[in-house]
Amino acid sequence: MKLKLIALLMILYAGTLSAAQDVQYNYDRETNFAAYKTYQWVEAGARGTADPLLDRDICRAIDNQLTQKNLQSVEHDGDVYVTYYTVTRQERQLDAWSMGPRWSAMARVNTSTVAIGQLVIEIFDPVRQRVVWRGAVSKELQISKDPDKNYRNLEKAIAKLLQNYPPRLKN
């Protein structure tokens, strides 16, 4: 449990990781996103963290992005509900190198385990009773000792993810 909590804190506070973030999203093509003016936070299963400061940082970064998209946060009766959750997983990384000409090359392969974190945001239409937008950002976790730097990384990851909301409809 303690290891799981540490991994969860790493993903959330780092927000993002070393190289580029991997962003994926999908949406309900029958939805008129322009009709949504307000949103309300809801807890859906795994939302939140054991660290209330971290939970507030994530919510604040999402709030900032949704406000820029002209959505207003309300306590009750939001046009849509917003929630987030996190996932961490371990991946094996292989680093191979060789030295010398091909016919007498010495090769070495190093393996390491890296933590990959994923932050998922879901937007749910309560009237239609379905998720209308879902996005995820994932990256290799690299935690800084500077909490302000970690928050800036979190903001960047969420901004990159929510640049796809509302979806741009193609004619």
Image (tube, helix red, strand yellow):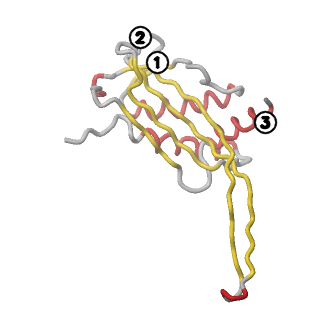
Position of residue 77 measured from the top left corner of the image (x, y, whole percent): 41, 10
Give the labeled residue for mark 1: 40
Q: Residue at x 70, y 47 (%)?
A: 143
Residue 71: name its quadrant.
top left
| Residue name at image x 53 percent, y 54 percent | 20
**What residue is drawn where x is 80% and y is 32%?**
2
Task: Specify the label residue 77 is tagged with.
Answer: 2
Residue under label 3, please give it. 3
Specify which label sits upstream in the sequence, 1 or 3: 3
Amino acid of disc 2: Asp
Q: Amino acid at mark 3?
A: Leu
Determine crowd level at label 1: few under 14, some 14-19, many 20+ residues with C-alpha closer than 10 A: some
Which label is found at residue 2?
none
Q: Are marks 2 and 1 in contact (CB under 8 Å)?
A: yes
Amino acid type, residue under disc 1 in the picture: Gln
Looking at marks 3 and 2 on the same chain, the residue that comes earlier in the sequence is marked by 3
In the picture as drawn, the residue positioned furthest to the top comes out as 76
Instruction: Reply above or below: 158 against 133.
Output: below
Q: Residue furthest left?
A: 171
Cα gap from disc 3 to disc 2, whole angstroms: 38 Å
Q: Secondary structure at mark 3?
A: helix
Question: Is label 1 in a helix, a strand or a loop?
Answer: strand
Picture layout, residue 4 above or below residue 96: above
Q: Label 2: how many residues lie within 10 Å, few (<14), some (14-19) or many (20+)?
A: few
The alpha-carbon separation of the residues under discs 1 and 3 comes to 32 Å
Quarter of the picture holding the C terminus: top left
Which one is nearer the viewer's eye here, 98 or 137? 98
